[in-house]
Amino acid sequence: MSEAAKWYVIHTYSGYENKVAQTILKVVENRKLHDLIPEVRVPTEMVMEKNDKDEMREVERKIFPGYVLVKMILTDDSWYVVRNIRGCTGFVGPASKPVPLTDEEVVALGVEKHSVEVGYSEGDRVKIISGPLEGYSGTVKSVDTANNNVCVALSMFGRETPVEFELDQIALDD
């Protein structure tokens, strides 16, 4: 049994994602299992959709229909609670044996936001410390911590070119 809470993927009946997530949270509350199952998520995104009257409106759409993400410490109790929720068909993994998501998968899915301390601001001279442009230096044009990106003006081929990077790809130039 693992000791640290990890993210697992649960397969559900289509359209039952929110119901399954709410039921898990309710069981966790009733049985006081907060230490075993701290988080349950149904990944969604906001998209613009055109209705039958050609009007655009913003709607919430499930990113992974039929799946729910659960952060839990895998024990017999937590497995039993999640597995026996109505609408849940099992864990994603071989023979419904729970397999946790890797750290890379968690970051790629955007399940957990990792915070980056930004030691630079607009107008500062910075260097690129990772990625294909590693080693280049430039000037910060804008910083967007909400979207985890920074725009840096790099001098390429004799021209100043704006390039976007993730916050952790940049460091202050010494």
Image (cartoon, rainbow, N blue to C red):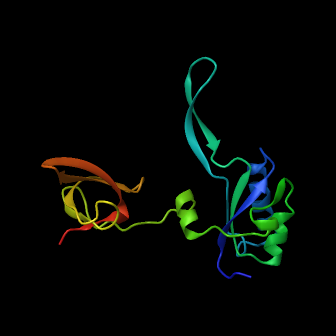
The image shows residue 153, relative to residue 50, as above or below, that is: below
Q: Quadrant of residue 165?
A: bottom left
In the shown orientation, is residue 169 left or right of residue 29? left
Q: Quadrant of the N terminus?
A: bottom right
In the shown orientation, is residue 11 left or right of residue 69? right
In the shown orientation, is residue 77 left or right of residue 132? right
Q: Quadrant of the C terminus?
A: bottom left
Q: Residue at x 12, y 49 (%)?
A: 158
The image shows residue 86, relative to residue 77, as above or below, that is: above
Rendered location of residue 60, percent (x, y): 61, 40
Rendered location of residue 96, percent (x, y): 81, 65
Can the viewer see residue 62 in this picture?
Answer: yes
The image shows residue 31, relative to residue 56, as above or below, that is: below
How many marks can you see? Answer: 0
Depth check: give the residue in front, 107 or 57. 107
The image shows residue 11, relative to residue 161, as above or below, that is: below
Rendered location of residue 30, percent (x, y): 81, 67
Depth check: give the residue in front, 42 or 67. 67
Can the viewer see residue 110 in this picture?
Answer: no
Depth check: give the residue in front, 101 or 40. 101
Q: Residue at x 62, y 23 (%)?
A: 51
